[in-house]
Amino acid sequence: MSILGNPVVRVEDPRFLTTGGIYAADIDLPDAVHAVFVRSTAAAGPIVAIETDSAREAPGVVAVLTAADLDLQPFSNHKSDVLRRFPLASSAVRFAGEAVAVVVAETYAQALDAAELVWVDVDAVDAVTSIRQALTNELLVHPELGTNVVNERSVDDLDFSGCDIVIDMEIANNRMNAAPIEPRVAAAHWGDDGRLTCWTSGQGAHPGQARIAGVLGLERDDVHVITADVGGSFGSKAAPGPEETTLGAIAKIIGRPVLWAETRTENFLAMGHGRSQLNRVRLGGSADGNLTHYQLDIAQEAGAYPEGVSFLPFFTSIMASGVYNFDHAAAGWVSVATNTTPVVAYRGAGRPEATACLERAIDAYAVQARIDPGELRRKNFIRPDQFPFQTPMGQVYDSGDYGAALDLALHNANYDDLRIEQKRRIDAGLASVLGIGIASYVEITAPGAMGTDAEFGSIEVGNDGKVIARTGSTPYGQGHETTWAMVISDRLGISMDDITVLWGNTDTVASSKITGGSRSVQLAGSAMADAADRVIAASKETAADLLEAAPADITFDATDGRFHVAGTPAKGVTWAEIASATEAAVVGVSEFSQTGATFPFGTHVAVVEVDTLTGNVTVLRFVTTDDAGTLINPLIAEGQVHGGVASGIGQALYEEITYDEYGNLTSSNLADYALPGPTELPSFDITLTQTATPLNPLGAKGIGEAGSVGSTPAVQNAVIDALAHVGVRHIDLPLTPSKVWNAYEKALAASPM
């Protein structure tokens, strides 16, 4: 019986819950010094001077360094010289929190105290702090560029003149912080062999190696990168940031290992933020609910440097049409610089924004057309018999059954009964009203495979019958050790207890890519399956010799992990016997690659209670149907949905990165930034369906981002649905009590008595 598809408890959890993982901050480096970065308190302006004398004389200080002391290449090699970012600012600062110097001391406390003594004189100028302000070009983040537009793709407007109903609305997607449990941490040390070893807390060792080597002007082979356990990332720590890339140069100058760990406030100030779009949505169709036209115009905030300005709106645009069969759809974008922290990937990276826009517009259309929002969706879905389906945005959806997902979610939510209870509360004039929100979504996973994509995977079976598996994927909470061991065990018939999975080391793993875009199971998992199959194929000749038979007559039985002659299973040889006979480990290296991305889908239903006296929103229930193709481990998949839904509810109701008019961050810690905890979240009612993809041998799609794609618009729709009876039609995210109360009171005042 196959182990795949069973809820196997994660094998990595005992060490995380007892002895703990081995993180970058745990690395024991004798004689190491500590680095603390000095950050600009001004959001914009030329640097007049950096005064470091007092800091150099402080107790324990080893060095105080600025850009002039470090021979560093650009951190981001943008095609425009004007937009290139260096790890330390030298001539001007462009956001509050940008690093301008680094203090190195014997202890962290000494470095922190000395950093307070560095005086950075900035000739501060007015800051650009919002998308709207940036679009006016009245103030410029990069004056030499002559505009705040750093990337754009324009499209012609669709003709909506033949539509009976046209929804034309502006939808904001609030800026967020990924808030990983482990903030950014790194270390650097030069060995006696002249090589640099760096420890990072990111999403891929080899991408980190490339970035560090590029900034330091080294050959990649001269940099050894180790990524061990990682305490969360969600895209924000995809590759080393500016601070991490400087540590090798600092260690070279000082001649000692260097450690750096940012504080939570630094994490809010300087680690890349997510989302931050301001979009115009137009949705048109017939009075009876036949949707025909959809246009999305995206305004993406870049922050001070254009690190995510092309791929984020690109992903929003290609997923703009969602699960619906539009006759006409178009999406274009403009990305603008502001004097704020750069915007980078965050869980979903552009895809949640697409769903948030479309699903909000669908509900607005349903209200105007007086059609049930579930029925409007069902009527316009792409049908199962239309797959593979090419969308107007140019994507080829591999497989799906959107109607089944909707029906199952509504059934599990007891949708009809909820509508009855909603009406009862309104008729009774209760202050506590009920809202039901629906969001049907499709997202793209393993987006690199829009062409062809792969991940490294190799398997070695030793003469003790145990397996060493090497993977290019980097786990940071997803349970890769368990999942890859399950795939290997299923293929080779070797106990999971005898399988060791290794990752995150450029010296011992041949290659790796950034683990993101929900690509791991379909690419790295399939690589493990392919490597296992190659180990089996490579072992048949040895098995034939041991069994004194022809290789063509040898078969392998994964149920007991033995080779035998076809038809005579009583006599067989084990993996240990195979390895012993070859006097070396039996090795298989994957050659699998996937052509075409996969498209998981689902429907989320949020049930909320809104207190109209205070504006407070309580999520009473959250019901999901999520389909990520064939599931290797439903327990892990459900955990991924849980995390994504929590993130999405947080965005809908609580979380927002905000700046004041001067460019000062006003949500700089977990007291100001309302990250939800268990008391703000209900138990989730999750159903996982399986519609296999034909694109990989496992039939798997991605699951890591699905929860965050569907949950935010479901909650937003639910809150607005709760207040629709008094005429509320839209409230921007996040739906804080003040926003909700003001919207309710304004609509109530405007409604006829």
Image (cartoon, rainbow, N blue to C red):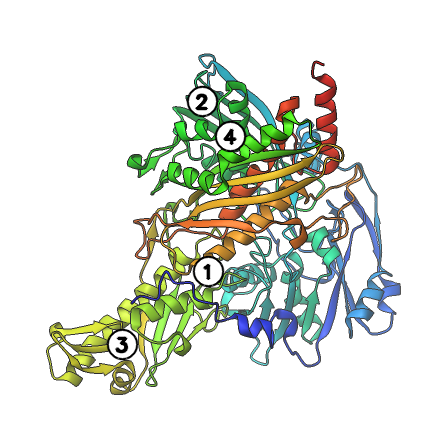
Q: Amino acid at mark 3?
A: Asp
Nearer-N-terminus badge (2/1):
2
Marks 4 and 3, how far apart at CA? 56 Å
Q: Nearer the viewer, residue 418 or 107?
A: 418
Would you name the residue on which mark 4 appears? Answer: 332
Q: In the picture, residue 620 is in which quadrant?
A: top right
For image coordinates 55% across by 38% down, the residue present is 714
Residue 21 spot, x, y in % from top left: 58, 72
Are there few (<14), some (14-19), or many (20+) residues within 10 Å of tag 4?
many
Task: Say the numbered circle drawn on residue 560.
Answer: 3
Observer-side mark, 2 or 1, equals: 1
* Secondary element at tag 3: loop
For image coordinates 21% across by 73% down, the residue present is 556
Would you name the residue on which mark 1 appears? Answer: 635
Q: Amino acid at mark 4?
A: Gly
Marks 2 and 1, how far apart at CA? 40 Å
